[in-house]
Image (cartoon, grey):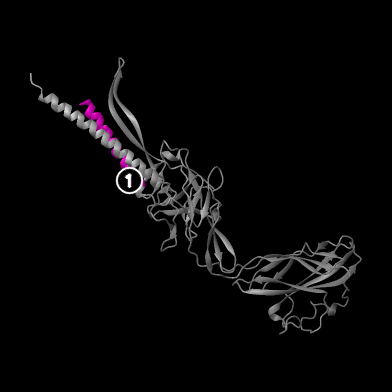
């Protein structure tokens, strides 16, 4: 009877092995799946006095979650793979959080990224500044577009030629003669600014050498004047139908050529905000006029073109005008013992006492892997290995059944004995 019981445990153990093999084979094409391994251990009823009573074998199932699957490229930006350690944090419809390596995310009807098992990708808004915290938001890739932003600041750095002829008659300066066809100025450039509705305005900036002053302190002076190009003549420039938006005096050190006063140059933008134009980098040197820096903030409204996801998990909205906006930070999570995580339906995991608690962090830091966009992680199942093990498990099951049959034959012989 002991022999038959041991054989039964062997058949059950090899049945479990065949079951795990079939689970692996059936998930050979499941994204992010980690193959399961059946482990055998001896059963002993009792020991003592140098004798053992053997009871056969038992099995346990372990998922090899720490294995890295092959990362294969796709054509979908929101397909995500992890190269290295860590898991995506996902939630079910009730909001419960889980871990997964299945990164086949696509937008649902509401724009939330959901994978093939129905779990939603979780992240934090970039504005929250909580890139490595427990994620609280479903990552949503639907946006109405980039709203306009009025221009409020900019930088204009130029070199003004110190050898330029000064305009000494105030009536000839650009600030004094908006309606005149012939105005005296030294150099001209322009900046772009956006009003409250996102309308672009070209601001013509005139720079005129007005000569030295004795001081104190002594300085070389220039006048800077801004006009709205929309008020210019048909061919551009003077005459203008309206006066200057702003005018200011720039003072330069006659010994170093650096600007000593006049910055920022404040320009009220029509139907917009006041542009504080930083001109502190402007110089007056013995060389030709040149523009070194010309930038302003603000933008016109534009439609959403798509999204990009960087290796550290930052999801950016890309707009048709070339602008981008960081919308979400997608953290990764990990535990001390990934192979001990509890496996659940849908290729997701939960932490437990044996796996250790979940730690969250930014991809690429703290031992976490990096996120690869437009890619998926293949299953770690090797079909050749599984089929080979299937033959081994079948042979072991058959051998145990032969032991059971032998025990049954012996029992039948014993039952047939007569006194």
Q: Which residue is mark 1?
A: 22
- Above or below residue 66? Residue 377 is below
Please identify the quadrant where the C terminus is shown.
top left
Say left or right for 402 vs 118.
left
Which residue is farthest right?
Answer: 214
Regarding mark 1 in the picture, which secondary structure is present there?
Answer: helix
Secondary structure mainly formed by the magenta segment: helix
What segment is highlighted magenta in the picture? 1-24
Q: Residue 185, image x and y in percent?
A: 82, 76
Q: Residue at x 20, y 28 (%)?
A: 407
Near-viewer residue (97 or 177): 97
User: Is 2 included in the stretch rendered in magenta?
Assistant: yes
- Above or below residue 223? Residue 233 is below
Near-viewer residue (175 or 52): 52
Say left or right for 294 vs 145.
right
Please identify the quadrant where the N terminus is shown.
top left
User: Is 169 included in the stretch rendered in magenta?
Assistant: no
Q: Residues within 10 Å of mark 1 (few under 14, many from 20)?
A: some
Near-viewer residue (24 or 243): 24
Residue 243 lies in quadrant: bottom right
Say left or right for 146 vs 355.
right
Q: Residue 195, image x and y in percent?
A: 63, 72
């Amino acid at each position: 009877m002991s022999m038959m019981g041991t054989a039964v445990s062997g058949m059950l153990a090899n049945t479990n092995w065949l079951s795990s093999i079939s689970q692996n084979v059936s998930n050979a094409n499941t994204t992010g799946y980690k193959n399961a391994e059946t482990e055998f251990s001896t059963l002993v009823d009792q020991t003592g006095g140098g004798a053992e009573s053997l009871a056969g074998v038992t099995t346990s199932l372990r998922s090899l979650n720490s294995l890295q699957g092959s990362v294969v490229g796709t054509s979908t930006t929101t397909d995500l793979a992890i190269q290295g350690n860590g898991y995506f944090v996902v939630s079910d419809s009730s909001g419960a959080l889980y871990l997964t390596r299945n990164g086949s995310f696509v937008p649902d009807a509401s724009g939330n990224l959901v994978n093939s098992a129905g779990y939603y990708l979780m992240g934090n808004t970039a504005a929250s500044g909580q890139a490595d915290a427990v994620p609280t938001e479903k990552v949503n890739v639907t946006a109405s577009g980039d709203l306009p932003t009025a221009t409020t600041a900019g930088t204009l750095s130029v070199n003004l030629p110190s050898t330029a002829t000064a305009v000494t008659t105030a009536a000839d300066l650009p600030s004094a003669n908006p309606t005149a066809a012939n105005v005296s100025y030294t150099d001209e450039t322009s900046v772009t600014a956006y009003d409250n509705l996102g309308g672009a305005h070209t601001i013509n900036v005139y720079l005129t050498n007005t000569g030295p002053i004795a001081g104190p302190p002594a300085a070389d002076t220039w006048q800077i004047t801004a006009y709205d190009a929309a008020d210019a003549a048909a061919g551009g420039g003077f005459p203008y139908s309206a006066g200057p938006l702003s005018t200011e005096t720039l003072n330069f050190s006659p010994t170093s050529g650096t600007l000593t006063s006049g910055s920022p140059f404040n320009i009220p933008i029509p139907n917009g905000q006041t542009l504080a134009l930083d001109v502190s980098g402007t110089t007056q040197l013995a060389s030709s006029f040149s523009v070194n820096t010309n930038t302003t903030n603000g933008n016109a409204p534009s439609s959403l073109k798509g999204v990009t996801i960087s290796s550290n998990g930052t999801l950016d909205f890309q707009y048709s005008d070339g602008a981008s906006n960081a919308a979400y930070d997608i953290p990764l999570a990990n535990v001390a013992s990934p192979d001990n995580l509890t496996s659940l339906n849908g290729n997701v995991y939960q932490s437990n006492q044996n796996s250790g608690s979940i730690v969250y962090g930014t991809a690429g830091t703290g031992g976490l892997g990096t996120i690869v966009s437009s890619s998926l992680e293949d299953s770690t199942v090797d079909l050749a290995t599984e089929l080979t093990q299937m033959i081994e498990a079948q042979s072991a099951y058959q051998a145990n059944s032969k032991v059971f049959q032998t025990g049954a034959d012996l029992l039948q012989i014993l039952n047939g004995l007569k006194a």
